[in-house]
Amino acid sequence: LKPETMPANDTVWACCRTKDTTKTALGLHDGGITLFDAINNQSISWKAHNRGVTDLHFSPDNNWLYSVAREGTIKVWNM
């Protein structure tokens, strides 16, 4: 991934990577999540929570991303 694809104006609070290291997820202080795909050299960002994302975890099969936020919510995302 190119350095300029990283979020420039946001603070990263959480980070995780798939076991095969092809995807990396960043949890941001504003409640957003940015997902980087190293194979396709692409990223996608979305507003996942109302407050900062404090923890992220991929499922063992890499099909799901779990996110936890300061508002006290846990969400599950289909990858």
Image (cartoon, rainbow, N blue to C red):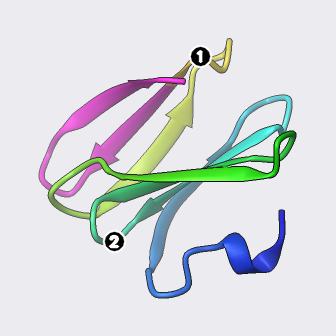
Sooner in the amino-acid sequence: mark 2 or mark 1:
2
Which residue appears at 26% of the width and 51% of the height?
69
Query: Magenta span has 41?
Result: no
What amino acid is found at the position of numbered circle 2 in the picture? Answer: His
Query: Magenta span has 69?
Result: yes
Q: Can you say which quadrant of the picture contains the N terminus?
A: bottom right
Q: Position of residue 10 (x, y in %)?
A: 44, 81
Q: CA distance from mark 2 to mark 1?
A: 24 Å
Query: How would you classify the magenta stretch by its main secondary structure?
Result: strand
What amino acid is found at the position of numbered circle 1 in the picture? Answer: Asn
Q: Position of residue 21 (x, y in %)?
A: 84, 39
Look at the image and give the residue range highlighted in magenta.
65-79
Residue under numbered circle 1: 63
Which residue appears at 55% of the width and 75% of the height?
7
Q: Say which of 48 and 20 sits in front.
A: 48
Residue 29, label in figure: 2
From the viewer's perspective, is residue 30 above or below residue 64? below
